[in-house]
Amino acid sequence: MKVSLLEIWHLIEILGPEKIQQIDLVLGSHELTDVSQKVIAEIKSGNEFDTELLPDLFTNSEIAWQPNEYASHKDCLAGINILKHQCEVQRLAFESTDSEISRFYADLIKNLEIETDKAIEKLSKETAKLSRILGTFRKSIYPLIKFLLEHPANHPQIKFEATLRQDFMAKTLFNEYHVKFSDLINPCWKVWIDEKPPMKPEKKEEIPEPASVEKPEIIKKEKVVTEKEDKPE
């Protein structure tokens, strides 16, 4: 079953921790699987959460929400490279701390970093359509930003400012990039009760068959037998 971000703690309290077998965090096309209940409890308490995450990765990164400011590939590349750098700084900070909750935040940021890499690769081609690239990029990072925005440990003023930018982000997607409201995916928890999700079958590596080598055609020479002519006596 799917549960909204802020309902997960109430659900665990109602069902009891032993009844829930697995919890996954779904962020659009990205997914953090098998998030422990310990991590989920630490998300609520704000343990090791950096309140500068939302400003660094969204509010102050205008490439993620600002309308009508990025009219060239060069401007877009500069903006996304700055965001990529912020992702790397924050991810490395979390990776330097050996704790489960820090690894969770590092993995979360890594998914945002993946989207910046995709956009950079597309923007490196001058012929690529700018509106399509920015529209796809902002739509892809929407669930990741939404998770940070709804994090219970956010400072109220930081959340207020980020909410204003998120409104700009959504309006820009609708008006300039022709994204539908239904295309924006909210993050959610996928909860497995009583039993774990079925194991995905492993993909068997297909070993290509060796190319058949055509044998050279052997031309057999037929032995010509000449019969001896009968001469009249």
Image (cartoon, rainbow, N blue to C red):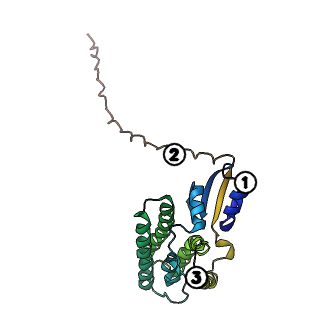
| Residue occupied by mark 3 | 162
Q: Are marks 2 and 3 in contact (CB under 8 Å)?
A: no
Q: Which of marks 2 and 3 is nearer the N terminus?
A: 3
Q: Is residue 125 visible?
A: no
Q: Residue at image x 56%, y 78%? A: 135
| Image: 122 above or below 160 | above
Where residue 72 is drawn, which disc sits there? Answer: none
Q: Which residue, as the protein is rendered here, is positioned at the far top?
A: 233
Quadrant in the picture for residue 170: bottom right
Image position, residue 31 (x, y; %): 56, 60
Q: Are there few (<14), some (14-19), or many (20+) residues within 10 Å of tag 2?
A: few
Secondary structure beneath dot 1 equals helix
Q: Which amino acid does label 2 sit on?
A: Lys
| Image: 18 above or below 189 | above
Q: Is residue 11 left or right of residue 199?
A: right
Query: Marks 1 and 3: which is nearer the front?
Result: 1
Query: Marks 2 and 1: which is nearer the front?
Result: 1
Image position, residue 213 (x, y; %): 35, 39
Q: Which amino acid does label 3 sit on?
A: Ala
Q: Quadrant of the C terminus?
A: top left
Q: Can residue 67 be seen in this view?
A: yes
| Residue occupied by mark 1 | 15
Q: Is residue 154 left or right of residue 13?
A: left
Quadrant in the picture for residue 168: bottom right
| Between 129 and 75, the one nearer to me in the picture | 75
Query: Marks 2 and 3: which is nearer the front?
Result: 3
| Residue occupied by mark 2 | 203
Q: Earlier in the sequence, mark 1 or mark 3?
A: 1
Secondary structure beneath dot 2 equals loop
